[in-house]
Amino acid sequence: MKTLKTLALATAVSAGLLGAGGAMAVVVDGDLATDQSIGKFDITLTTNTMIRVWGLDDVSEDVDSVSSLPTPLATDFCVYTNGTNNQFDLTVSTGKGFELYNDGNSGSLEYALEIGDAGATQKKANFNSETNITELFDAGASQPDPAQECSTGNMSMQVSFSQTGLNALPDGTYTDTVTITVQAK
């Protein structure tokens, strides 16, 4: 009976030691000593790739005359990533295919977007109905804090229209929705 209890205890102890997880931590316990004892342990922190786009504003303009329209209309926004070399893909999609449509459906106006980064490449890319809508950008070494308001954007965007198309538009309100998607590299 005593042998059976000893075997059960040995099995329980080894199961507890061996079944406590996959990798063993690099922990070194100190020895019992009279003057000092030294122990060691590791600290490990693993971060995931993160990305954020924010600070986008609606772009709108009331036009009294075609000649008063500031072309292009401009705005800044922010992109943060901790991905490789601060690089990210930016994809633009629109609800109406890079065209503004009148609420009353009495006309439309094509537009184009130029988006640029403030990174080392100073890259600019044009997005319209005839271009590839995904481009690689650099968020720059000095990126905005993703936890703060986007007060100074590291990305710029300009919306431009054909002057000829503007001259032919009936009065009305012309709209489209632009979606910007960023993906860390």
Image: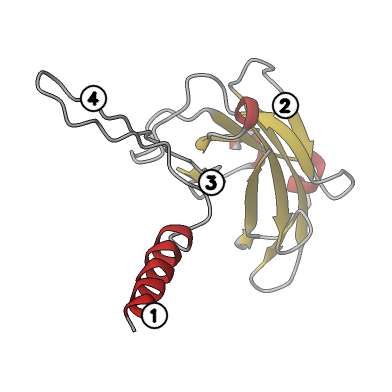
Identify whether 35 is placed above or below 77: above
Q: 32 and 115: which one is in front? A: 32
Note whether residue 152 is visible: yes
Labelled pair 3, 2 in contact (Cβ < 8 Å): no
> Residue 150 appears at what percent x and percent y?
40, 36
Mark positioned earlier in the residue sequence (4 or 3): 4
Q: Secondary structure at mark 2?
A: strand
Which residue has dot 4 on it? 38
Using the image, tell me which numbered label, if any, was put on residue 61: 3
> Sequence-wise, which precedes: disc 2 or disc 4?
4
Q: Decide which of tag 3 and tag 1 comes sooner along the chain.
A: 1
Q: Which residue is mark 2?
A: 124
Q: CA distance from mark 4 to mark 3?
A: 70 Å
Q: Is residue 60 above or below residue 43?
A: below
Q: CA distance from mark 3 to mark 1?
A: 88 Å
- Residue 88, given in percent of the width and then of the height, sits at 66, 37
Q: Amino acid at mark 3?
A: Glu
Q: Nearer the viewer, mark 3 or mark 1?
A: 1
**In the picture, residue 20 is in which quadrant?**
bottom left
- In the image, residue 68 lies at what x, y percent? 59, 35
Position above or below: 126 against 33: below
Give the distance between the C-alpha atoms of the residues marked 1 and 4, in whole angstroms.
39 Å
Residue 32's disc is none
The part of the image, by quadrant, that contains residue 85 is top right
Assess disc 1: are there few (<14), some (14-19) or many (≥20) residues with their C-alpha within 10 Å of its C-alpha: few
Label 1 element class: helix
Q: Is residue 123 left or right of residue 53?
A: right
Count the marks: how many? 4
Q: Nearer the viewer, residue 141 or 98?
A: 141
Quarter the N terminus occupies:
bottom left
Q: Are marks 2 and 4 in contact (CB under 8 Å)?
A: no
Q: What amino acid type should be assigned to the residue bearing mark 1?
A: Leu
